Image (spheres, helix red, strand yellow):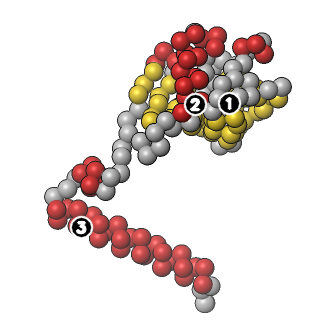
Amino acid sequence: MAQDSGELDSQDNGELDSLVRKRIRALRVAQGWSLEELAARARVVVSHPMIDAAHGLMRWPIKAEPGMTVVRQRMTDPPPDNPSRMRAHPGREWLVVLSGTACLLLGNRRLRIETNQAAEFPTMLPHAIGAEGGPCEILGIFDRDARRGHQRGEDVGKANRPSA
């Protein structure tokens, strides 16, 4: 039975991938390098999280994009009922729900974001986020301005917690 060109390309790519991996490993081992040393020599940065247990957060700065930050947060509380507790500040935010369901208040809209769904928005729109129907876990990416806006909010207290 003949294979179509897509199947052949896929097979060829798999074989090439395997060959490249084996060759890189052989060269690395021949040099006596660990994976970490190879990563450092290739200027690949491995970043460990800064843990903020008080806010249920883990943060990673994005080394290649100064000012950008990745945040992972577990949420158990729903978003605030009072619109005056929504926050607005310069910047942009992107988030994906890793598990559970989140409720994003964005201006006068209420958006339900389920596992594997994402949202992106300018943070000048009043916003807040919380869990819906049980705990949820989100991963957010903040630009420099959004990160600064959220860091100032953490000092105010739990009532004005960052949206992500």
Find residue 105 and report its horizontal and vertical position in percent.
76, 26
Task: Identify the element where label 1 is drawn.
Answer: loop
Q: Residues within 10 Å of mark 1 (few under 14, many from 20)?
A: many
Q: For marks 3 and 2, give the CA distance.
A: 45 Å
Q: Are the residues tagged 3 and 2 within 8 Å (C-beta)?
A: no
Q: Are the residues tagged 2 and 1 within 8 Å (C-beta)?
A: yes
**Which residue, given by chain and number where applicable, does mark 2 sit on?**
145
Task: Identify the element where label 3 is drawn.
Answer: helix
Dot 3 or dot 2: first in sequence order is 3
Q: Is residue 59 above or below residue 42?
A: above
**Which residue, given by chain and number where applicable, does mark 3 sit on?**
26
Which residue appears at 17% of the width and 65% of the height? Answer: 30
Q: For the residue marked with disc 1, what is the amino acid?
A: Thr
**Which residue, given by chain and number where applicable, does mark 1 sit on?**
123
Find residue 137 and report its horizontal and vertical position in percent.
59, 31
| Residue 28: quarter of image | bottom left
Q: Are the residues tagged 1 and 3 within 8 Å (C-beta)?
A: no
Q: For the residue marked with disc 2, what is the amino acid?
A: Asp
Between 40 and 31, which is closer to the camera in this rendering? 40
Find residue 114 and report its horizontal and vertical position in percent.
71, 37
| Residue 23: quarter of image | bottom left
Dot 1 or dot 3: first in sequence order is 3
Q: Is residue 29 above or below residue 145?
A: below
Is 129 left or right of 154, judged from the image as shown? right
Is 113 left or right of 143, judged from the image as shown? right
Which residue appears at 16% of the width and 62% of the height? Answer: 31
Frontmost of labels 3 and 2 is 2
Frontmost of labels 2 and 1 is 2
Q: For marks 1 and 3, give the CA distance.
A: 48 Å
- Residue 74 in sight: no
Find residue 70 and report its horizontal and vertical position in percent.
51, 36
Which residue appears at 47% of the width and 30% of the height? Answer: 59
